[in-house]
Image (cartoon, rainbow, N blue to C red):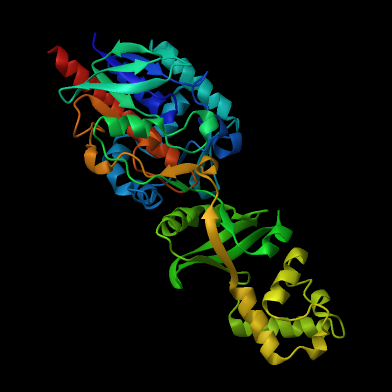
Amino acid sequence: MSKIIVIGGGPAGIMAAIKAAENGANVILFEKMNRIGRKLAITGKGRCNLTNAADIPEIIKNIPGNGKFLHSALRNFTPENTINFFEKTGLKTKVERGNRVFPESDKAADVIEVLTRKLAMLGVEVRTNAAVNEIVVEERTVSGVLYSGKFEETDAIILATGGSSYPATGSTGDGFGMAKRTGHTVTKILPALVPLETEEDFVKSLQGLSLKNVRVTLKADDKKISELFGEMLFTHFGVSGPVILTLSRTAAKLLSEKKFVELFINLKPALSPEKLDARILRDFEKFKGRMAKNAMVELLPGKLITPVLDLAYIPEEKPVDDITKAERLRLVETLQNLPLTVTKTRPIDEAIVTAGGVSVKEINPKTMQSKLVSGLFFAGEVIDIDGFTGGFNLQAAWSTGFTAGINCAEYVSSLEK
């Protein structure tokens, strides 16, 4: 029986091994950590956001990093297929806000358990603590792998080592080096879905403050690039939260191009400047005779009052009765354009996913096989694909793993004929 080696025991590698084995191949799964599914265990804050129950166009829209490349893979294995796959293995699922799909138990460990059981049932040999160092290629065809000073012969390989984010789980980017040495192009590696560091000192005083229903605008060299509405969070180094993570991929790219990157937060996006001014006037009337900092308690969270007044050049001790119209209009402008200068992203090992990877131009999107090396297939985050939070990255992993597994099994089967 022909043999397939899968390198990487994350979601894409596990799915690839399962599908290859189901299609009659003899499969060995190499995982350098002491157990498979380490990164899977921490996804969705330990609850494991399995997929997103959206249609394929919506999934692609939420994968800004080469989402269109996934058309075939997503049709091969849809979000509905993902849900059915897990239900059949005995894992009940539920759909939450934003179409995010989780195990009913809210435990990522249950996902890993059913996948481990499935691998065992199919006779997949799982080798843990086994780091592959090299893919051996002869005459543009894979012939084996080198690991721990040993050579293991094989008929085909599925490279599913993940990206460079969360290195403690085994995603240390070594797959990029292996791919490069087989002649593949690896695009620039950047963090995606990552918090952003900012220059302003006042941010430290806002640590832990979460804001809902704000609009955040991303600008580069004073040009508007993107805008999102939702939730964000201040940290000791800058900003995080859903809106920031979504914008971070673009911010990382702009920073790598040496652009001057800024964020502008509209704290009151539901109000026009005129209506916001009228609201401030009402508050000032209500708190007549008080200092400015004490007259804004109904307008802003306490931590934000001093920074906003400072940015509007209004002394916080100034009585509201003495605040001029010009000062009030500066206050309106600050409330709807709170500026933050982005200096850098947090390190890639804090990113949820990696932007960049093996160039999609060198991979057949219908089969996930390399266009350069026969018998070499790719799956998951090692490919230059990345999506937003909400189950989109895991769906990409399942779909590419499924496609690589089936087509790799077909490839080795054809060698026997």
Q: Percent x, y for residue 103?
A: 55, 32
State the image quarter where residue 102 is shown: top right
Q: Which residue, as the protein is rendered here, is positioned at the far right? A: 289
Q: Percent x, y for residue 199?
A: 60, 62
Q: Percent x, y for residue 403?
A: 29, 31
Horizontal side of 173 relative to 244 (left or right) equals: left
Nearer the observer, 97 or 285: 285
Which residue occupies 85% across, 85% down?
Answer: 288
Quadrant in which the C terminus is drawn:
top left
Q: Which residue, as the protein is rendered here, is positioned at the far left? A: 417
Which residue occupies 25% across, 30% down?
Answer: 182
Residue 360 visible in the snapshot: yes
Nearer the observer, 389 or 346: 346
State the image quarter where residue 310 is shown: bottom right
Which residue occupies 26% across, 36% down?
Answer: 184
Horizontal side of 199 relative to 8 (left or right) equals: right
Which residue occupies 58% across, 80% down?
Answer: 272
Horizontal side of 172 relative to 327 (left or right) equals: left
